[in-house]
């Protein structure tokens, strides 16, 4: 089999590595002419990190990331609402990585170049359409810089891993509207900062109405003096927004006042924000789940299939799980059409639930509950506001839907056991 992968982001590169391990041929076509350090922080949870470990990438990922130790939730007065361990610290076999997206991308790209061969990764190829007949699928491309037409590429199947603004999703579902705005805008940055709390804490604080922060370190000892790269996201209900672009610069004056009095004994939030070199802005958007992803020999994967709010650290993880499921289906079925259908049957309903859960009750629902029950006031004792059982139920409920509760992970076949052609 020969699979054409459109998009060499997190999902496309992981798919190429899994297919290669299974002995299935593939080629990657990526529109970016070169890989540049784009984006900011991203999290890989144990359900996805086990797949990356199965690909032999754990040592390298550990070197360039922070192994997240705990999740901590505070109100906007800096009072602790809830704390729970994460990753290996919570008893999982695999870690939770907090990592700069470009570092994750570099690790995947280097592994793909080495294992597939650089001649199977085409950069600067922008996909502009797909066609198919009874024997093959064909992708049309243009040079991403000059705009000139490039030769069509034929394969047994095409997998669209071309992200949030997927050209192939648009071709399959031309009547679908633009991404749906949640009413929340986000500003993101990375600051050089001394370790906060445990030095490996994922902090969520405040609530969207007045301003919410997500803060976590993504690289240790970034300056040789023990300071870390600390990723932060400021989220604020905002009536208007600009189209999502991963690289749109943001203006600190649009949001910093919401956090002006967040001077806690464990962190000075306005100072952290001001320490960032650059600020990016993007709206929190998603799409309604699609009724189908697959048309014959063409299917969708990752953000192209199921863009979701980044409220559960699951965008990259679900793309990685898609890649695993699609590889398993291609190994199990001789016929690529049947394999693509089988993959969709497993993954579409599952990821649709994650999209819905990210709207309704992602982990930060803990903050919403505290905000609403206190009327946005400081509390004397958190137990008077919300019980520990309720907090655990909110957190565990999300893990079950997204597939990273410990029980679900115990029942999944570990990577490499189902198919290991090497
Ligand atoms: C530049 C960039 C920065 C990001 N920064 C962050 C971040 O800071 N934090 C975070 O949580 N998430 C970030 N994301 C999103 C995150 O990587 C995805 O949500 C998640 O990893 C799902 O992976 P994916 O492979 O589906 O999509 P992505 O990782 O977004 O990959 C999609 C790939 O397809 C390529 N592509 C798009 N259109 C075409 C086309 N027509 N032809 C060929 N190739 C095409 C893109 O260049 C990209 O490499 C970023 C994505 C990008 C592209």
Image (cartoon, rainbow, N blue to C red):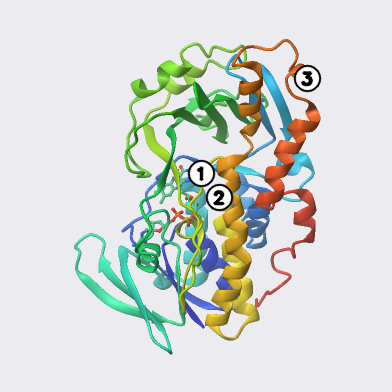
Q: CA distance from mark 2 to mark 3?
A: 31 Å
Q: Quadrant of the C terminus?
A: bottom right
**Label located before the other in sequence (2 or 1):** 1
Residue 43 drawn at (x, y percent) = 58, 44
**Residue 116 in the image: above or below residue 161:** below
- Asked if the residues shown at circle 2 and circle 1 are in contact, with their CB atoms under 8 angstroms apart, the answer is yes
* Residue under the point 43% across and 89% down: 135
Disc 3 is placed on an element classified as helix
Q: Quadrant of residue 245?
A: top left
Percent from the top left, x then y, of residue 367?
62, 27
Separation of marks 3 and 1 at Cα, in angstroms: 30 Å
Do residues under tags 2 and 3 come within 8 Å of each other at their CB atoms?
no
Q: For mark 2, what is the residue? A: 355
Determine which residue is flagged by label 3.
383
Going by the picture, which residue comes out furthest to the bottom? 135
| Residue tagged 1 | 309
Label 2 to label 1, Cα distance in Å? Answer: 7 Å
Q: Are marks 3 and 1 in contact (CB under 8 Å)?
A: no
């Amino acid at each position: 089999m020969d699979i054409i992968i459109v998009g060499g982001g997190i999902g496309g590169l992981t798919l190429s590595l899994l297919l290669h391990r299974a002995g299935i041929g593939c080629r990657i076509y990526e529109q970016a002419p070169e890989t540049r350090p784009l984006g900011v922080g991203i999290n890989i949870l144990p359900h996805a990190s086990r797949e990356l470990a199965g690909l032999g990438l754990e040592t390298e990922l550990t070197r360039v990331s922070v192994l997240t130790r705990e999740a901590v939730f505070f109100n906007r007065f800096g009072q602790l609402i809830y704390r729970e361990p994460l990753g290996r610290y919570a008893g999982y076999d695999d870690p939770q990585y907090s990592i700069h997206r470009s570092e994750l991308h570099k690790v995947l790209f280097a592994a793909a170049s080495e294992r597939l061969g650089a001649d199977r990764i085409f950069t600067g190829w922008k996909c502009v359409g797909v066609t198919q007949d009874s024997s093959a699928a064909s992708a049309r491309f243009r040079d991403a810089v000059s705009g000139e037409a490039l030769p069509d590429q034929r394969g047994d199947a095409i997998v669209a891993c071309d992200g949030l603004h997927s050209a192939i999703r648009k071709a399959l579902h031309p009547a679908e509207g633009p991404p749906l705005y949640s009413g929340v805008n986000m500003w993101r940055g990375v600051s050089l900062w001394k370790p906060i709390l445990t030095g490996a804490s994922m902090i969520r604080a405040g609530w969207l109405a007045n301003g919410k922060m997500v803060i976590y370190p993504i690289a240790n000892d970034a300056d040789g003096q023990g300071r870390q790269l600390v990723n932060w996201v400021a989220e604020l209900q905002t009536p208007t927004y600009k189209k999502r672009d991963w690289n749109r610069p943001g203006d600190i004056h649009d949001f910093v006042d919401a956090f002006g009095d967040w001077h806690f004994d464990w962190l000075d939030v306005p100072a952290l924000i001001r320490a960032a070199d650059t600020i990016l802005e993007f709206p929190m958007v998603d799409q309604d789940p699609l009724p189908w992803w697959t048309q014959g020999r063409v299917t969708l994967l990752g953000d192209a299939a199921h863009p979701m709010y980044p409220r559960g650290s699951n965008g990259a993880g679900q793309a990685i799980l898609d890649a695993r499921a699609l590889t398993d289906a291609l190994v199990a079925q001789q016929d690529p059409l049947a394999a693509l259908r089988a993959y969709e049957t497993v993954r579409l309903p599952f990821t649709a639930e994650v999209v819905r859960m990210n709207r309704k009750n992602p982990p930060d629902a803990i903050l919403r509950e505290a905000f609403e029950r206190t009327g946005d006031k400081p509390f004397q004792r958190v137990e008077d506001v919300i019980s520990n059982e309720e907090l655990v139920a909110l957190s565990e409920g999300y893990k079950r839907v997204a597939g990273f509760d410990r029980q679900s992970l115990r029942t999944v076949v570990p990577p490499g056991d189902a198919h290991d052609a090497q």
